[in-house]
Image: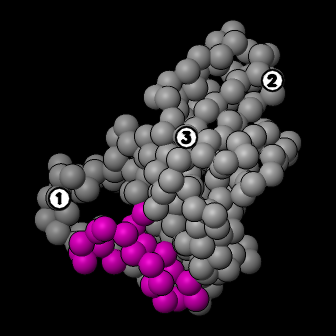
Amino acid sequence: ETGVTQSPTHLIKTRGQQVTLRCSSQSGHNTVSWYQQALGQGPQFIFQYYREEENGRGNFPPRFSGLQFPNYSSELNVNALELDDSALYLCASSLGGLNTGELFFGEGSRLTVL
Amino acid sequence: DAKTTQPPSMDCAEGRAANLPCNHSTISGNEYVYWYRQIHSQGPQYIIHGLKNNETNEMASLIITEDRKSSTLILPHATLRDTAVYYCIVRGNDYKLSFGAGTTVTVRA
């Protein structure tokens, strides 16, 4: 148990729809990052939030967006869903923004786009 | 990001030591070697990390060569619960982890 919780655990959407995934970080952690893991591949970095500001982004289009709230919980929003967005979405929390602290991952939200 | 090379899979007998190799020949002086593992259908779990010196914790040992171009993760007494994908990651003063394909380790009874 890492103390990082994600919801929902599973969901199914259709192409063109929008989805919001949620993450509660470990107590005391002020940094949240999101990763996408396609079947059979390693996780790919989407972006990171530190003190409610995005401070790093991977190679994902603008239809992937996020928020971090004052209590450091976070949302990942994906607009105009495509079939290739089907994946496990992982949230990780850590302490300290740009430092190299250990990341604690949640169990993920599995998104299926039909 | 420096890249790592790991064997795609390996088997290990329960109760024996599992030695997982990783090559990172382009690693820079300020970059750390991290190991994570991912048990099926779960999120990645931190195992250990190091810069130059060998490191040991309750889960594993990390042996880094003197030239830092390769490392070995050692699980001293593998159990069936250690069956997972193991990722070797090189990370600098950066916020993200760059995962490769990892090594699928199967521990057999």
Image x and y of residue A110, in percent: 39, 50
Name the kind of residue labelled 2 in the image: His
Left or right of A82? Residue A99 is right
Magenta span covers which residues?
A: A45-65
- Give the secondary structure at mark 3: strand
* Subunit of label 3: B
Residue that badge 2 annotates: B77
* In this view, B86 is above or below B90: above
Residue that badge 3 annotates: B23
Q: Which residue is drawn at 56% across and 51% down?
A: B89
Q: Which residue is drawn at 18% across and 52% down?
A: A83
Let me know if residue B83 is in the magenta part.
no
Q: Main secondary structure of the magenta part?
A: strand
User: Which one is in front in this view, the residue at disc 1 or the one at disc 2?
Assistant: 2
Q: How far apart are marks 3 and 2 (CA)?
A: 23 Å
Q: Residue at x 80, y 51 (%)?
A: B53
Find out whether the residues at labels 3 and 2 contact each other: C-beta distance under 8 Å: no
Find out whether the residues at labels 1 and 3 contact each other: C-beta distance under 8 Å: no
Left or right of A95? Residue A89 is left
Point out the tag, 3 or 2, that comes first from the N-terminus: 3
Q: Residue at x 59, y 79 (%)?
A: A98
- Given residues A1 and B24, the one toward you in this image is B24
Disc on res. A82: 1
Q: How far apart are marks 1 and 2 (CA)?
A: 44 Å
Q: Distance between the residues labelled 1 and 3?
A: 36 Å
- Given residues A19 and A82, the one toward you in this image is A82
Q: Crowdedness of circle 3 by 10 Å Cα count: few (<14), some, many (20+)? A: some
Image x and y of residue B102, in percent: 49, 38
- Given residues B80 and A97, the one toward you in this image is A97
Image x and y of residue B70, in percent: 62, 42
* Subunit of label 2: B
